[in-house]
Image (cartoon, coloured by chain):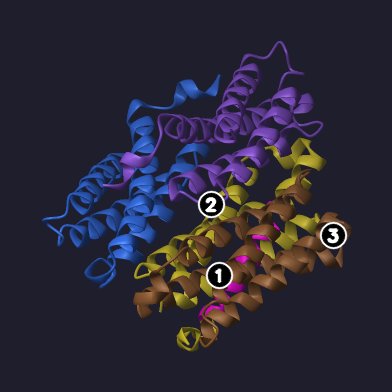
Chain colours: A brown, B yellow, C blue, D purple
């Protein structure tokens, strides 16, 4: 069976991408409920971008695509940028949990680029 | 934080949807490698449909959407139909593993409809 | 070539689904910019649901899937519900344009169910 | 209304991405029906990658995302590579139509990178 060929690192990266997708989507819902400053700036849009790219990145790995590395590189960059944006809300537990997940996902994606 | 409101059943259903999405995509790749009878009939298309619907279903649950039950109902039906198609390849380990995952995902989706 | 088999109605339905997906995504961005009452209630979440379901519905038609009718039925219902929500903002041009697109997409999806 | 800010080039690029997504999905179905040499090599997987990336690329433009250029660059590269793969089937009308669409989409995406 083909699944034998999948490395532990790639398995972790897929899991992190889907966990990060979920976290971003849920944090967007949280921001909409909170309103005001949580809606300002680029944070909402960046979480939406990350959610989309994490799902796409997961799908490329699932398919064993040739361009996995390039997609992972782009995903890692988006997640890092978004984490920095989330960390501006330093006193908010949800935003900081999202930032943490984003950094973890970025690290996993960077592992794929090696 | 909002994630408190998510039930254990829904969490399991999301996990099963994503595992089923991955299994269907990988089994499609397997069928393409095997060729011949693995490409005949509706099995390939049904796995592709299930992969798409499982991902959509996961996303509806992540968003806490009003129409979760209806999407889960449709996902459950597709997964059951696809499982029956996969089970026609009774001597093939990959196809039977896919069928098993599809039935598990269908059961989780049916739990959401209650 | 296979594309010959696609009816004019299905072609229009796919186009409407993608136009509706785009309209919902752009109207969500508009609501985030406007803030306040545009963020209240279920409108944002319903537009997000519609965007997802329209894209899924388009993909099922593209693939010529067995379950097209069922997916179109669900898409039509979501679009109708979302249109009613948007129409609460009767003096807002963007919200009313979104409602109009949603009703057009719902009508096209209902045509597929016949 | 916000849609005024969208350039004609971006509008065309979104349309090309969705047309290319559709073409790739339908050509995959065609290849599965034809079987044999149409299933060999990387062509199927590359069309699947392109379909996914075109849809993601469209969504980034719809959202007016910061990272549009980077996503367009990656999409352009994938489409070019896939077109070359399709062009190996020089006597097949469907494969050549797919290659033509892929090259058109790549050109539109490259316009976005300027």
Residue A87: x and y in percent read 58, 77
Above/below status of C33 relative to D54: below
Q: Nearer the viewer, mark 3 or mark 2?
A: 2
Q: Which mark is residue A6?
A: 3
Q: Is residue D62 left or right of residue B8?
A: left
> Crowding near pointer 3: few (<14 within 10 Å), some, many (20+)?
few
Mark 1 vs mark 3, CA separation in Å? 33 Å
Q: Is residue B73 left or right of residue A113?
A: left
Instruction: Determine if marks 1 and 3 fall on one subunit.
Output: yes
Above/below status of B100 relative to D75: below
Q: Quadrant of residue A22?
A: bottom right
Instruction: Determine if marks 3 and 2 fall on one subunit.
Output: no
User: Residue B22 magenta-drawn?
Assistant: yes
Residue at 57% of width from left, 23% of height from top?
Answer: D104
Task: Kindly identify which chain the residue marked by label 1 belongs to.
Answer: A
Q: In the rendered view of the protein, which quadrant contains the N terminus of chain A? A: bottom right
Q: Which mark is residue D75?
A: none
Mark 3 vs mark 2, CA separation in Å? 32 Å
Secondary element under disc 3, as helix, strand or loop, is loop
Secondary element under disc 1, as helix, strand or loop, is helix
Task: Kindly identify which chain the residue marked by label 2 belongs to.
Answer: D
Residue at 47% of width from left, 60% of height from top?
Answer: A45
Of pointers 1 and 3, the one earlier in the residue sequence: 3
**Mark 2 and mark 3 in contact (Cβ < 8 Å)?**
no
Task: Kindly identify which chain the residue marked by label 3 belongs to.
Answer: A
Region of the chain picked out in magenta, as a range:
B10-25
Q: Which mark is residue A85?
A: 1
């Amino acid at each position: 069976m083909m699944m034998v060929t999948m490395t532990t690192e790639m398995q972790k990266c897929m899991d992190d991408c889907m966990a990060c997708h979920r976290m971003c989507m849920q944090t967007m819902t949280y921001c909409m409920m909170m309103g005001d400053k949580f809606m300002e700036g680029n944070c909402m849009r960046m979480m939406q971008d990350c959610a989309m790219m994490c799902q796409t990145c997961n799908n490329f790995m699932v398919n064993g695509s040739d361009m996995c590395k390039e997609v992972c590189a782009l995903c890692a960059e988006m997640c890092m940028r978004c984490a920095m944006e989330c960390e501006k809300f330093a006193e908010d537990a949800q935003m900081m949990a999202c930032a943490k997940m984003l950094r973890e996902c970025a690290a996993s994606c960077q592992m794929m680029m090696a």
